[in-house]
Image (cartoon, rainbow, N blue to C red):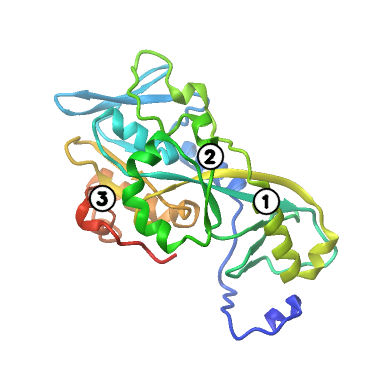
Amino acid sequence: ERGRVTGRPWKGGVFSPSDGTADPGKAAPAVAAAFMKLGGSVNQHCAARGIELEGGRVSGVVTEAGVIKARTVVLAGGAWASSFCRQLGIRFPQASIRQSILSVSPIEQRLPDALYTSGVSVTRRGDGRYALAISGRARVDVTPQFLRFAPQFVPMFAKRWRNLLPGGLEGMRGGHETLKRWRLDAPTPMEAVRILDPKPDMPTIAETYRRAVELLPELRESTITHAWAGYVDSTPDGVPGIGEVPGVPGLILAAGFSGHGFGIGPGAGHLIADLATGAQPIVDPIPYRPSRFGDSAWGKVADF
């Protein structure tokens, strides 16, 4: 019944009417507003340069506007996280995968709010447009950091070779995967490129639209209104690193969400808050511990 809109037979599927969809462009500002309402502060347009240490433990965050004192700091730097860790001599294997997405104009017939298949996914946005993407399809751009950690990512690339394609030098432009150390009293790569906004891969955009129209013929009425790309901060096993960083008391890492940050963000945020405050963790944090990225973990890749 639900698959009838596609005009093709289906062997099966999952329909979950209790599920919902969310628009990151609306959800993130709403979370920030709620945080400030509860007494927190949000410092926008201000680059974080690094972590300040006193006696071997965290004492604050160095920003371009000064130092923010804190005994506990959460490093949720996304694609920048590995470079940040490197400034402290910490090895955090990470690869930034460039994924391209597009949106199309509203059409007269309303399609399902969310439809996922192995070939393409379609999600209705709040303004009536639809976001289209191919899950897992991305370009792997060459950077100094990628070359350093490439051996640890061989199992992942081998498992996902159909969707992970060779990229170019786009990742060099952002400077987020540099191997260099930087000073905390001078401008850093975060000030040079404040927002990672890589170029979308246009062949992927065209293929995504073709698949979506083939799946949902009604989309032929639509036009592409926007195409964009972003860097997915991936770990070798596809599971985020969440937990206190060994050797740096007070520093909690929360990065490498491998494309699932928005979906699992609320639960991950709860776990991070538990770790920061010493409360009973909402789930067992051991599987997410940053120290797991050793030789013993080589070859293990999550199914997602």
Q: Which residue is mark 2?
A: 33
Q: Position of residue 273 (x, y in %)?
A: 32, 47
Q: Look at 68% across and 58% down and name the residue there.
A: 207
- Which quadrant is the N terminus positioned in? bottom right
Say few, some or many: other residues with alpha carbon within 10 Å of mark 2 (under 14 / 14 to 19 / 20 or more): some
Say few, some or many: other residues with alpha carbon within 10 Å of mark 1 (under 14 / 14 to 19 / 20 or more): few
Viewer-proximal residue, 145 or 30?
145
Q: Which element is circle 2 on?
A: helix
Nearer the N terminus, badge 1 or badge 2? Answer: 2
Nearer the observer: mark 3 or 1; the answer is: 1
Q: Which residue is mark 3?
A: 293
Nearer the N terminus, badge 3 or badge 1? Answer: 1
Image position of 240 (left or right of 174): left
Q: Position of residue 4 (x, y in %)?
A: 73, 81
Please say if 218 is above or below 132.
below
Nearer the N terminus, badge 2 or badge 3? Answer: 2
- Which quadrant is the C terminus positioned in? bottom left
How many angstroms separate mark 3 from mark 1 (CA)? 34 Å
Q: Position of residue 197 (x, y in %)?
A: 58, 36
**Are dots 1 and 2 in contact, CB under 8 Å?**
no
Please give the label number shown on residue 87.
Answer: none
How many angstroms separate mark 2 from mark 3 (CA)? 35 Å
Q: Position of residue 261 (x, y in %)?
A: 46, 51
Q: Which residue is mark 1?
A: 203
Image position of 166 (left or right of 183): right
Image position of 231 (left or right of 68): right
Nearer the observer: mark 2 or 3; the answer is: 3
Q: Which element is circle 1 on?
A: helix
Q: Look at 31% across and 50% down and name the residue there.
A: 152
Q: Look at 36% across and 46% down and name the residue there.
A: 150
Identify which amino acid the numbered label 2 is placed on: Ala
Identify which amino acid the numbered label 1 is placed on: Pro
